[in-house]
Amino acid sequence: MSPNTYLFKEGDSGNFFYLIKQGELELTIPNVTEKKYLRGGDSFGELALIQKNKRSGTVKSIDDVKIYCLESNIFKEIVAKLNNSDLKERIFFLNLIPIFKILNSHQIQEIARYMIKCEFQESHVIIQEGDIGESMYIIKEGTIICSKNEKEIRKLYAKDFFGTSSLLFQLSRSLTVTSMNESICYQITKRLLIDILGNDFAKIILQGIAKNAISNVKMLKVLGIDEYFSKVFPLMELKFYKNNKVVVNKNHYENRRIIIVVEGNLINVLIFSYLFY
């Protein structure tokens, strides 16, 4: 490539994985003022291939550049073979996530095979508060700090996970998540869940959570039978409550309902309010 040539622009389809043999390129990402420079030995372009997304940035050559290009299908075959070598470990981590317990073994295996292993350096911002979330993460190694308005809320460790609410409900990120030290996480993207479960992946997961919760309560178990559950689920309403918000008032008529907790915790829970994690 000659100087000042665009390799690809933001919004282009991703068809290749790139490895720089020689030269320098400039990477520009929307809403990020600082430009990133890529040099000999650097590689890039894999996320657009794995997630089947459009290119998230623009890459332009600074000087004469030589690049190795690997076609999308070949790249994905190589990634799948590499991931197969630690597939059992990936499935183990995936089975730690309550929302995935309703999936069958084939679906679990496919998610495990194609979820992305990410390595983060110390102090790397993984999630920024306020951003739109299209991924969730499972921590394999390291310590992760969750903060709000620059104040630490909690720490997460190996086998913990984060980002599920934004992924399922398309909410903006409520916390900033930063690696405290060198950390390794498995990333599960919205695109991957769509590929395996379809466009209604969030509804499928929520249906599974509700059905499993109902089936675990003796007096409600009959409602978990497919014939009845197909009529019950459309009557359920998904609600979001902020911290310290009253969910049930003991003197209120709305007490005549069943509550299934998809995420979070309730305190002072009354009898017949059933929780599912």
Image (cartoon, helix red, strand yellow):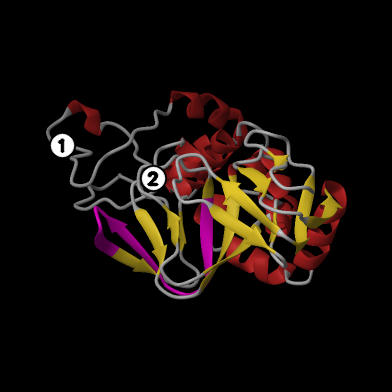
Name the image quarter holding the C terminus.
bottom left
Q: Classify 10 Å Cα crowding around label 2: few (below 14), some (14-19), many (20 and above).
A: some
- Check disc 1: other Cα within 10 Å, few if <14, some if 14-19, many if 20+: few
Q: Identify the image quadrant of residue 153.
A: bottom left
Q: What amino acid is at disc 2?
A: Arg
Residue at 62% across / 36% down in the picture? 10
Q: Is residue 77 above or below residue 215?
A: below
In depth, the one of 248 and 65 nearer the eye is 65
Q: Which residues are magenta?
A: 136-153
- Report the number of numbered marks: 2
Residue 259's quadrant in the figure?
top left
Front position in the image: 97 or 259: 97
Whether residue 95 is visible here, answered yes or no, is no
Q: Which residue is mark 2?
A: 173
Residue 31 seen anywhere in this rendered image of the structure? yes
Provide residue 25's location: percent of width, then percent of height: 66, 53
Residue under circle 1?
A: 249
